[in-house]
Image (cartoon, rainbow, N blue to C red):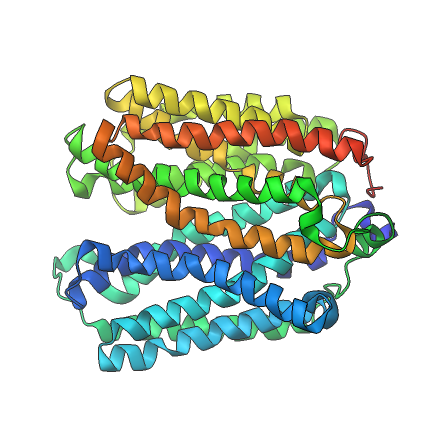
Amino acid sequence: MSSQNAKTNWAQFIPLATVFFFWGFVAASNDILIPVFKEAFKLSQFESQLVSFAFYIAYTVGSLILIGISAIMKTDLINKIGYKNSLALGLGISALGTLLFYPAANNGSFTLMLSGLFIVALGFSLQQTVANPLAIALGPIKTGSQRLTLAGGINNFGTTIGPLIVSFAIFGTATSGNTTLDIQSVKIPYLILGAAFLVVAILLKFSSLPDKPALIEADQKEGGKKGSALAYPQLVLGMIAIFVYVGVEVSTASNLPEYMIKDLGFSTKDIAPYISLYWASMMIGRWTGAVEAFTDNISLQKVLRFIAPYLAFGVFLLVNAIAKHDLAPFYVYAVIILVLIIADMASKGNPARMLLIFSGVGILALLVGMFTEGMVSVYAFTSVGLFCSTLWPCIFTLAVSGLGKNTSQGSSFLIMMICGGALISPLQGLVAGYIGIQYSYVVGVLCFAYLVFYAWKASSILKAQGIDFDQKISGGH
């Protein structure tokens, strides 16, 4: 194992983290585009949802293209051209997608807009395939999932400010109360975004990021002896885990407005802070879970475990204070954050144990939401964001461990399963039609139940392969 992996390489990690920010910025901005496109193009509710479908399905298509090219070349494309070049190529593809917004706006074409979003996400698919295992590789394997959690926290900063910036670019300030919009106003923010993609691609190309990460190279000697990533049970079961995880994360938030309007009598305009709280909960959990990536000092880790989540909660309160929302209903949430801190401490940084504990508490949160009323149920549902927050890096770390030369192929299969976000949310909506919106959250309970199973199963599979996260103090194998 290379000595560079004795601790996190921040000089390499920080430029890598910019792409995680972009993914969050664009994905959350889609929530602004949906009502804008619906009004501008006179769409039905179903047609407006094609924005989400076009975006998320591109991840699956992108992964299939990558797998297909690798099969034709008889070698893994990312290993062939290098991780750094692959990131730059992915950013270039996304930049091309933003260019389509210009003719789309000029011609008033919804189809061209969707095509633009699809190509942006196609680039993201390649970026995600490379960046996730790379974040794990830039330091010791023991803190790999924490580095991925930290990158996720940066992603959530993007989800927090993306909609605000895009909304401001399209509508300007809301004080005039003027709701007329010109579809032409969509052009500028996305052209600026495209320019940003290209700038970051150039910076990454000339950065010190490794083209062949030491951890993945080292794994090739010990792992990756099988011909295909699909020969590893930790990956195959992990693909299902990513599918249901993204599904429960997206569906919990997307069905919450319907519950608050229909069952609790909220007006549409008063819901935004609660949806904001859900995504802020993801950030709170990720900042907490990333503590170990910063320091090996146990005493300092204990202090930071209390400071980090409340710092993130402070960011949420600040954003809502600037938006002139009433903060009084949210102070009680500080108590719920304590549950997260206790769960995080109990996991002791082991990704399998963290996945088991957080999924278990996620089930508990959904059950409380399903069988209580009023604000208690709302806070129970929003707290699911806290317990979803660190699951992606836990699943990803477990699924690609031991894959060696098949790591990037395995990563590609995992990114393909992001389509769970496009399918499980409508499934919950369908269930709600039969048993009501509040009880439809049983879909999320079933998703978490599978994650509990995967945490237990993956741990035993990896131990049989000689991989034990409790014993990996530094440098991996």
Q: Nearer the viewer, residue 31 or 300?
A: 31
Q: Nearer the viewer, residue 314 or 217?
A: 217
Is the residue 292 above or below the residue 75 in the image?
Answer: above
Residue 459 in picture, x, y percent from top left: 70, 30
Residue 72: name its quadrant: bottom right
Q: Is residue 294 visible?
A: no
Is the residue 282 above or below the residue 198 in the image?
Answer: above
Query: At x 83% / y 53%, what residue is drawn?
Result: 4
Query: At x 40% / y 32%, what residue is drawn?
Result: 444
Residue 279 in picture, x, y percent from top left: 40, 42
Is residue 419 left or right of 236 when viewed as pictured?
Answer: left
Q: Nearer the viewer, residue 424 or 261?
A: 424
Residue 201 in picture, x, y percent from top left: 59, 72
Residue 168 in picture, x, y percent from top left: 28, 61
Query: At x 35% / y 56%, what residue is drawn?
Result: 52
Query: In the rendered view of the protein, which quadrant contains the C terminus?
Result: top right
Is residue 170 left or right of 92 when viewed as pictured?
Answer: left
Is residue 295 left or right of 173 when viewed as pictured?
Answer: right
